[in-house]
Image (cartoon, rainbow, N blue to C red):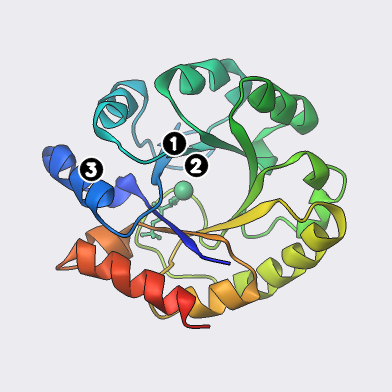
Amino acid sequence: MSILLAPSILSADFGNLNRDIEIVNRGDADSFHLDVMDGVFVPNISYGFPIIKAIARKAEKPMDAHLMIIDPDRYLSNFKDLGVKFLSVHYEACTHLHRTVQAIRSLEMKAGVALNPHTPVLLLEDIVRDLDFVLVMSVNPGFGGQSFIENSLEKIARLKELILKKNPNCLIEVDGGVNAENAGELARAGADILVAGNAVFGAPDPLEAMQVIKSAAYNI
Ligand code: DX5
Ligand code: ZN
Protein backbone atom coordinates (compact mmCIF):
# COMPACT_ATOMS: atom_id res chain seq x y z
CA MET A 1 0.00 0.00 0.00
CA SER A 2 1.25 3.47 -0.80
CA ILE A 3 2.38 5.79 1.95
CA LEU A 4 0.80 9.21 2.26
CA LEU A 5 2.82 12.31 3.14
CA ALA A 6 1.34 15.18 5.16
CA PRO A 7 3.68 18.19 5.40
CA SER A 8 3.19 20.09 8.66
CA ILE A 9 2.48 23.76 8.09
CA LEU A 10 3.86 24.52 11.59
CA SER A 11 7.32 24.51 9.99
CA ALA A 12 6.30 26.71 7.05
CA ASP A 13 7.38 30.33 6.72
CA PHE A 14 4.27 32.25 7.84
CA GLY A 15 5.59 35.35 6.09
CA ASN A 16 5.51 33.38 2.85
CA LEU A 17 2.52 31.20 3.52
CA ASN A 18 1.16 31.30 -0.04
CA ARG A 19 4.51 30.13 -1.39
CA ASP A 20 4.65 27.23 1.07
CA ILE A 21 1.04 26.22 0.41
CA GLU A 22 1.91 26.11 -3.31
CA ILE A 23 4.86 23.85 -2.53
CA VAL A 24 2.46 21.36 -0.92
CA ASN A 25 -0.06 21.75 -3.75
CA ARG A 26 2.56 21.07 -6.42
CA GLY A 27 4.74 18.56 -4.60
CA ASP A 28 4.62 14.89 -3.74
CA ALA A 29 2.31 15.48 -0.77
CA ASP A 30 -1.17 14.17 0.00
CA SER A 31 -2.58 16.57 2.57
CA PHE A 32 -1.92 19.62 4.75
CA HIS A 33 -1.18 18.76 8.39
CA LEU A 34 -2.41 21.60 10.62
CA ASP A 35 -1.23 21.69 14.25
CA VAL A 36 -3.56 23.57 16.57
CA MET A 37 -2.10 24.22 20.04
CA ASP A 38 -3.76 26.04 22.92
CA GLY A 39 -0.89 26.70 25.36
CA VAL A 40 -2.72 24.55 27.96
CA PHE A 41 -2.69 20.98 26.68
CA VAL A 42 0.78 21.63 25.25
CA PRO A 43 3.35 24.27 26.26
CA ASN A 44 3.02 26.23 23.02
CA ILE A 45 0.44 28.23 21.06
CA SER A 46 0.43 27.78 17.29
CA TYR A 47 -2.36 29.21 15.14
CA GLY A 48 -6.11 29.07 14.86
CA PHE A 49 -9.11 29.75 12.66
CA PRO A 50 -7.99 32.86 10.68
CA ILE A 51 -4.82 31.12 9.49
CA ILE A 52 -6.67 27.90 8.66
CA LYS A 53 -9.19 29.95 6.70
CA ALA A 54 -6.34 31.48 4.69
CA ILE A 55 -4.83 28.04 4.06
CA ALA A 56 -8.23 26.62 3.04
CA ARG A 57 -8.59 29.26 0.32
CA LYS A 58 -5.41 28.06 -1.43
CA ALA A 59 -5.14 24.39 -0.45
CA GLU A 60 -5.80 21.94 -3.29
CA LYS A 61 -5.33 18.89 -1.08
CA PRO A 62 -7.30 17.78 2.01
CA MET A 63 -6.65 19.44 5.37
CA ASP A 64 -5.77 17.22 8.34
CA ALA A 65 -6.12 19.11 11.64
CA HIS A 66 -4.37 17.80 14.76
CA LEU A 67 -5.95 19.36 17.83
CA MET A 68 -3.58 19.70 20.78
CA ILE A 69 -6.18 21.45 22.86
CA ILE A 70 -8.31 20.75 25.90
CA ASP A 71 -12.07 20.46 25.44
CA PRO A 72 -11.97 20.01 21.63
CA ASP A 73 -15.74 19.30 21.53
CA ARG A 74 -16.35 23.06 21.66
CA TYR A 75 -14.76 23.61 18.27
CA LEU A 76 -15.49 20.54 16.12
CA SER A 77 -18.06 22.26 13.92
CA ASN A 78 -15.71 25.22 13.33
CA PHE A 79 -13.21 22.83 11.77
CA LYS A 80 -15.92 21.27 9.64
CA ASP A 81 -16.98 24.72 8.45
CA LEU A 82 -13.38 25.51 7.46
CA GLY A 83 -13.31 22.43 5.24
CA VAL A 84 -11.16 20.13 7.37
CA LYS A 85 -11.43 16.49 6.23
CA PHE A 86 -9.34 14.64 8.85
CA LEU A 87 -9.69 15.70 12.48
CA SER A 88 -7.74 14.21 15.38
CA VAL A 89 -8.16 14.83 19.09
CA HIS A 90 -5.83 13.67 21.85
CA TYR A 91 -6.71 10.63 23.94
CA GLU A 92 -5.27 12.49 26.94
CA ALA A 93 -7.55 15.52 26.40
CA CYS A 94 -10.91 13.76 26.09
CA THR A 95 -12.85 12.43 29.06
CA HIS A 96 -15.70 11.20 26.86
CA LEU A 97 -13.65 10.11 23.88
CA HIS A 98 -16.35 7.91 22.35
CA ARG A 99 -18.77 10.84 22.35
CA THR A 100 -16.17 13.13 20.76
CA VAL A 101 -15.37 10.59 18.03
CA GLN A 102 -19.07 10.16 17.25
CA ALA A 103 -19.47 13.93 17.04
CA ILE A 104 -16.58 14.21 14.54
CA ARG A 105 -18.10 11.45 12.41
CA SER A 106 -21.56 12.94 12.54
CA LEU A 107 -20.01 16.08 11.02
CA GLU A 108 -18.75 13.85 8.19
CA MET A 109 -15.06 14.25 8.94
CA LYS A 110 -12.62 11.35 9.35
CA ALA A 111 -12.08 10.82 13.08
CA GLY A 112 -8.64 10.23 14.56
CA VAL A 113 -7.25 9.81 18.05
CA ALA A 114 -3.72 11.00 18.84
CA LEU A 115 -1.57 9.26 21.44
CA ASN A 116 1.22 10.94 23.37
CA PRO A 117 4.50 8.98 23.48
CA HIS A 118 3.74 7.57 26.94
CA THR A 119 0.15 6.50 26.21
CA PRO A 120 -0.07 2.76 25.49
CA VAL A 121 -1.88 1.54 22.37
CA LEU A 122 -3.89 -0.99 24.38
CA LEU A 123 -5.98 1.92 25.70
CA LEU A 124 -7.53 2.08 22.24
CA GLU A 125 -8.89 -1.46 22.41
CA ASP A 126 -12.49 -0.35 22.98
CA ILE A 127 -12.50 2.62 20.61
CA VAL A 128 -10.43 1.48 17.61
CA ARG A 129 -13.52 0.08 15.82
CA ASP A 130 -14.92 3.62 15.73
CA LEU A 131 -11.81 5.30 14.33
CA ASP A 132 -10.71 6.21 10.83
CA PHE A 133 -7.12 6.75 11.93
CA VAL A 134 -4.79 6.78 14.92
CA LEU A 135 -2.08 9.43 15.17
CA VAL A 136 1.02 8.16 16.96
CA MET A 137 3.06 11.03 18.39
CA SER A 138 6.72 10.15 17.96
CA VAL A 139 7.81 13.28 19.87
CA ASN A 140 6.17 15.04 22.80
CA PRO A 141 3.61 17.34 21.19
CA GLY A 142 4.14 21.08 21.17
CA PHE A 143 7.05 21.83 18.86
CA GLY A 144 8.41 21.02 15.43
CA GLY A 145 12.00 19.98 14.84
CA GLN A 146 12.38 17.50 17.74
CA SER A 147 14.12 14.11 17.55
CA PHE A 148 12.16 10.96 16.81
CA ILE A 149 11.52 8.75 19.88
CA GLU A 150 12.74 5.28 18.88
CA ASN A 151 10.16 3.39 20.98
CA SER A 152 7.54 4.65 18.50
CA LEU A 153 8.55 1.98 15.97
CA GLU A 154 7.63 -0.86 18.30
CA LYS A 155 4.50 1.01 19.33
CA ILE A 156 3.36 1.33 15.70
CA ALA A 157 3.90 -2.40 15.18
CA ARG A 158 1.75 -3.17 18.26
CA LEU A 159 -0.92 -0.75 17.07
CA LYS A 160 -0.91 -2.42 13.64
CA GLU A 161 -1.63 -5.78 15.31
CA LEU A 162 -4.56 -4.29 17.22
CA ILE A 163 -5.91 -2.65 14.06
CA LEU A 164 -5.65 -5.84 12.01
CA LYS A 165 -7.65 -7.63 14.69
CA LYS A 166 -10.35 -5.02 15.25
CA ASN A 167 -10.59 -2.58 12.33
CA PRO A 168 -8.29 -3.17 9.32
CA ASN A 169 -9.55 0.01 7.63
CA CYS A 170 -8.12 2.23 10.35
CA LEU A 171 -4.99 4.12 9.20
CA ILE A 172 -1.86 4.89 11.23
CA GLU A 173 -0.45 8.41 11.05
CA VAL A 174 2.98 9.12 12.55
CA ASP A 175 3.91 12.61 13.68
CA GLY A 176 7.19 13.99 14.99
CA GLY A 177 10.81 13.70 13.89
CA VAL A 178 9.89 11.91 10.65
CA ASN A 179 12.54 12.18 7.92
CA ALA A 180 14.00 10.31 4.93
CA GLU A 181 16.14 8.17 7.27
CA ASN A 182 13.27 6.70 9.29
CA ALA A 183 10.47 6.79 6.66
CA GLY A 184 11.23 3.26 5.41
CA GLU A 185 11.27 1.72 8.89
CA LEU A 186 8.03 3.52 9.75
CA ALA A 187 6.32 2.18 6.64
CA ARG A 188 7.58 -1.31 7.45
CA ALA A 189 6.24 -1.06 11.01
CA GLY A 190 2.77 -0.22 9.67
CA ALA A 191 2.54 3.55 9.15
CA ASP A 192 0.16 4.74 6.42
CA ILE A 193 0.54 8.53 6.73
CA LEU A 194 3.80 10.31 7.56
CA VAL A 195 3.70 13.86 8.91
CA ALA A 196 6.87 15.85 8.28
CA GLY A 197 7.51 19.46 9.22
CA ASN A 198 11.16 20.27 9.58
CA ALA A 199 12.26 17.55 7.15
CA VAL A 200 10.22 19.29 4.41
CA PHE A 201 10.24 23.03 5.14
CA GLY A 202 13.67 23.03 6.79
CA ALA A 203 15.22 21.46 3.68
CA PRO A 204 17.00 23.60 1.08
CA ASP A 205 14.58 22.23 -1.54
CA PRO A 206 11.23 21.21 0.02
CA LEU A 207 9.92 19.77 -3.26
CA GLU A 208 12.91 17.46 -3.51
CA ALA A 209 12.68 16.63 0.24
CA MET A 210 9.08 15.45 -0.19
CA GLN A 211 10.09 13.19 -3.08
CA VAL A 212 13.00 11.72 -1.12
CA ILE A 213 10.82 10.97 1.94
CA LYS A 214 8.13 9.40 -0.23
CA SER A 215 10.54 7.19 -2.13
CA ALA A 216 12.29 6.15 1.09
CA ALA A 217 8.89 5.01 2.38
CA TYR A 218 8.16 3.10 -0.84
CA ASN A 219 11.50 1.32 -0.89
CA ILE A 220 10.62 -1.18 1.82
C1 DX5 B 1 4.28 18.55 17.10
C2 DX5 B 1 3.37 18.54 15.90
C3 DX5 B 1 3.99 18.05 14.65
C4 DX5 B 1 5.17 18.84 14.16
C5 DX5 B 1 6.06 17.89 13.43
O1 DX5 B 1 3.54 18.81 18.24
O2 DX5 B 1 2.23 17.72 16.14
O3 DX5 B 1 3.02 17.93 13.60
O4 DX5 B 1 4.85 19.92 13.33
O5 DX5 B 1 7.21 18.56 13.09
P1 DX5 B 1 8.57 17.78 12.80
O6 DX5 B 1 8.33 16.94 11.58
O7 DX5 B 1 9.52 18.92 12.55
O8 DX5 B 1 8.92 16.96 14.00
ZN1 ZN C 1 0.84 17.28 14.39
Residue mark closest to the camera, 1 vs 2: 1
Question: Vertical placement of 190 versus 86: above or below?
Answer: below
Question: Vertical placement of 38 versus 115: above or below?
Answer: above
Q: Residue 71, can we see it?
A: no
Residue at coordinates 56% horizontally, 72% vertically from top-left?
Answer: 187
Residue type marked 2: Val
Q: Quadrant location of residue 204?
A: bottom left
Q: Is mark 1 within 8 Å of ligand 1?
A: yes
Residue ID for mark 2: 42
Q: Position of residue 158 (x, y in %)?
A: 76, 69
Residue 21: give its label: 3
How much space separates mark 3 and mark 2, taking CA atoms?
25 Å
Give the secondary structure at mark 3: helix
How much space separates mark 1 and mark 2, taking CA atoms?
6 Å
Tell which circle, 1 or 3, labels the residue nearer the N-terminal end: 3
Residue type marked 3: Ile
Question: How many other residues sit within 10 Å of disc 2, few (<14), some (14-19) or many (≥20)?
Answer: some
Residue ID for mark 1: 37
Q: Position of residue 218 (x, y in %)?
A: 47, 76
Q: Is mark 2 within 8 Å of ligand 1?
A: yes
Question: How many other residues sit within 10 Å of disc 1, few (<14), some (14-19) or many (≥20)?
Answer: many
Residue type marked 1: Met
Tell which circle, 1 or 2, labels the residue nearer the N-terminal end: 1
Q: Between 5 and 146, which is closer to the camera in this rendering? A: 5
Q: Is mark 3 within 8 Å of ligand 1?
A: no
Tally the marks: 3
Q: Position of residue 195 (x, y in %)?
A: 44, 57
Residue 102: give its label: none
